[in-house]
Structures are given as C-alpha cells and as structure tokens.
Image (cartoon, rainbow, N blue to C red):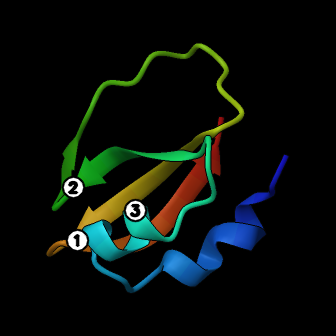
Amino acid sequence: MMTENEFKYVVGKTLETAKGELPPKYFFFTAEEDGKSFYRSMDFNPYRINIIVKEGKVYRIQGIN
C-alpha cells in the first residue's frame, strides 16, 4: 500500500491529468471542491485518495482511506 507522501506529485496538477497518473487500483475522491464539502462514507478503503480541489487543480491530499 502506498502512503500519502507518495501521491504529493499530483498537487498542482489538473484533476484530469492527476487521474491519468494514478497507479492501478487507486482512485481520487474529491472531499472538497472550491469550498464545498462532499459526503464520503467512513468505510475504510486503502485505495481511496481524498483530495481538495480548487479551480480545477489538486490543491491538497487530505488522506488515504
């Protein structure tokens, strides 16, 4: 399993570009976009990368779960 630090390379990239660079199995969940939060289940998923998006770009990795 990869760590949060191993995904820092996507910060600053457009969401579409970042999605294209993810390893197999992993996927992004947009937890917040331009100040609007989105509901996510609390079910553990080691391949879900929670991100914050601002103006169409990955602003921050919020965690992996």
Q: Quadrant of residue 39?
A: top left
Per the image, label 1 sits on a secondary structure element best described as: strand
Per the image, label 3 sits on a secondary structure element best described as: helix
Tell me the distance, in whole angstroms, between the alpha carbons under discs 3 and 1.
15 Å
Tell me the distance, in whole angstroms, between the alpha carbons under discs 3 and 2.
16 Å
The crowd level at tag 1 (other Cα within 10 Å; few <14, some 14-19, many 20+) is some
Position of residue 34 measured from the top left corner of the image (x, y, whole percent):
16, 62
| Residue identified by numbered label 1 | 54
Position of residue 4 measured from the top left corner of the image (x, y, whole percent):
72, 60
| Residue identified by numbered label 3 | 19
Of badges 3 and 1, the one in the foreground is 3
- Could you say which is closer to the camera, residue 9 or residue 39? 9
The crowd level at tag 3 (other Cα within 10 Å; few <14, some 14-19, many 20+) is some
Of badges 3 and 2, the one in the foreground is 3
What amino acid does circle 1 point to? Answer: Lys
Q: Residue drawn 41% across and 71% down?
A: 18
- Outermost residue, right direction? 1
